[in-house]
Image (cartoon, helix red, strand yellow):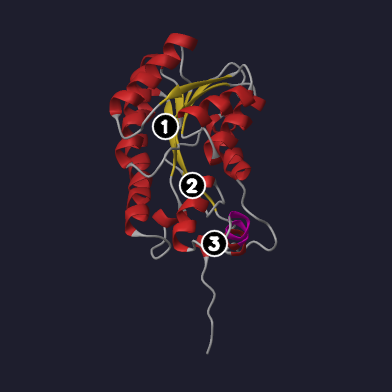
C-alpha cells in the first residue's frame, strides 16, 4: 500500500511510532525514525532493517524538525508521509506540519498525520496538561486541512484510547509506583469497552497505514478515533 513512499515518523523509537514504522515498511515504504532517544532509535532502525534510518530529533526544537525533513529530502529526494507522533507538545506538531508542507507543496501531494487522543475529545480522562494539547491537535488538523487541500495535501489525526506503550506505562507508574509494568498493562486493557478486545500499538499503526495510503486518498481533516467505542456512549448506572 505504500510502495515507493518515504515517511518521516517522530517518536518512532518505541510504542505507536515504532509499530507504525514496522507497518509502513511491511507495506513497502522507506521510513526515517526521528526520536530524542538516540540509542533506542538506532537500535530500532537496525531492528527494522535497511528501509529504516534514524535521525536524532527533539520535537520541542523547531530546528530539529526542519533538519529532519531536510535529511529525508537529502537521502530520498521526497517526503510522502509525515507522521507527527512524538510527545504532547503542540508546537512540535505545528512545526512538523509546517516543514512537511514546505516540501510537499511544490509536489502538490503528501499525507500528514498527527497523534491526538480520546482525552482531546472527552473531559476528565487525563490531566489538563495532557488533554489540552491533544484537543488542540485535533483543531489544528481541521484548520490546516482547509489550507492544504488546494495543494493536494491531506492531513488527518488519530485519537487512540489508552495503549500500554512505554510512555503510558511510565506515566502510570508515577501514580502507582508499587505496581509492575505487566499489571499496569492489564489495568489499561481492562479500561476498554469492546468485549475482550485489547487495543495494541499495531491497531493504531493500521489506522495510520489507511490514512497514509491511497486507501484514504479522499480523507482529509478527519479525526480517526480508535477507541472501541469508548467515546460513543456512557452507560447509565442506576442506584
| Mark 1 crowd level (few <14, some 14–19, many ≥20, 10 Å Cα) | some
Q: Position of residue 228 (x, y in %)?
A: 59, 57
Q: Is 182 part of what is drawn in magenta?
A: yes
- Point out the stretch of residues depicted in magenta: 181-186
Give me the residue at 52% from left, 33% from top: 13
The reply to whether the C-beta atoms of the residues labelled 3 and 2 are less than 8 Å apart is no
Q: Is 164 part of what is drawn in magenta?
A: no
Closer to viewer: mark 3 or mark 1: 1
Q: CA distance from mark 3 to mark 2?
A: 21 Å
Q: CA distance from mark 2 to mark 1?
A: 13 Å
Q: Position of residue 206 (x, y in %)?
A: 61, 39
Give me the residue at 40% from left, 42% from top: 87
Task: Compare residues 176 and 141 and report the one nearer the observer.
Answer: 176
Task: Give residue 4's quadrant in the image.
Answer: top right
Which residue is label 3 attached to?
230
The reply to whether the C-beta atoms of the residues labelled 3 and 1 are less than 8 Å apart is no
Q: Is residue 206 above or below residue 194?
A: above
Which residue is label 2 attached to?
167
Q: Position of residue 36 (x, y in %)?
A: 42, 32
Main SS type for the magenta part? helix
Q: What is the secondary structure assignment of the residue under circle 2? A: helix
Q: How many marks?
A: 3
Q: Is residue 57 left or right of residue 62?
A: right
Which residue is label 1 attached to?
36
Amino acid at each position: 500500500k505504500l510502495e515507493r513512499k518515504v515517511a518521516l515518523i517522530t517518536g518512532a523509537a518505541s510504542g505507536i511510532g515504532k509499530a507504525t514504522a514496522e507497518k509502513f515498511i511491511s507495506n513497502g515504504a522507506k521510513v526515517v525514525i526521528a526520536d530524542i532517544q538516540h540509542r533506542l532509535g538506532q537500535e530500532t532502525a537496525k531492528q527494522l532493517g535497511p528501509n529504516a534510518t534514524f535521525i536524532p530529533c527533539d520535537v520541542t526544537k523547531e530546528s530539529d524538525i526542519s533538519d529532519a525533513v531536510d535529511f529525508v529530502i537529502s537521502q530520498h529526494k521526497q517526503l510522502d508521509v509525515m507522521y507527527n507522533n512524538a510527545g504532547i507538545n503542540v508546537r512540535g506538531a505545528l512545526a512538523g506540519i509546517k516543514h512537511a508542507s514546505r516540501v510537499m507543496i511544490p509536489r502538490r501531494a503528501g499525507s500528514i498525520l498527527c497523534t491526538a487522543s480520546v482525552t482531546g475529545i472527552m473531559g476528565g480522562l487525563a490531566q489538563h496538561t495532557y488533554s489540552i494539547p491533544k484537543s488542540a491537535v485535533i483543531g489544528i488538523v481541521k484548520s490546516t486541512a482547509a489550507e492544504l487541500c488546494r495543494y493536494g495535501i491531506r492531513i488527518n489525526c488519530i485519537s487512540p484510547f489508552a495503549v500500554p506503550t512505554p510512555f503510558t506505562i511510565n506515566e502510570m507508574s508515577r501514580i502507582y509506583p508499587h505496581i509492575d509494568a505487566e499489571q499496569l498493562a492489564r489495568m489499561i486493557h481492562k479500561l476498554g469497552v469492546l468485549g475482550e478486545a485489547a487495543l495494541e500499538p499495531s491497531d493504531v499503526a493500521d489506522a495510520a497505514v489507511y490514512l497514509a495510503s491511497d486507501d484514504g486518498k479522499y480523507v482529509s481533516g478527519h479525526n480517526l478515533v480508535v477507541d472501541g467505542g469508548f467515546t460513543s456512549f456512557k452507560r447509565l448506572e442506576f442506584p
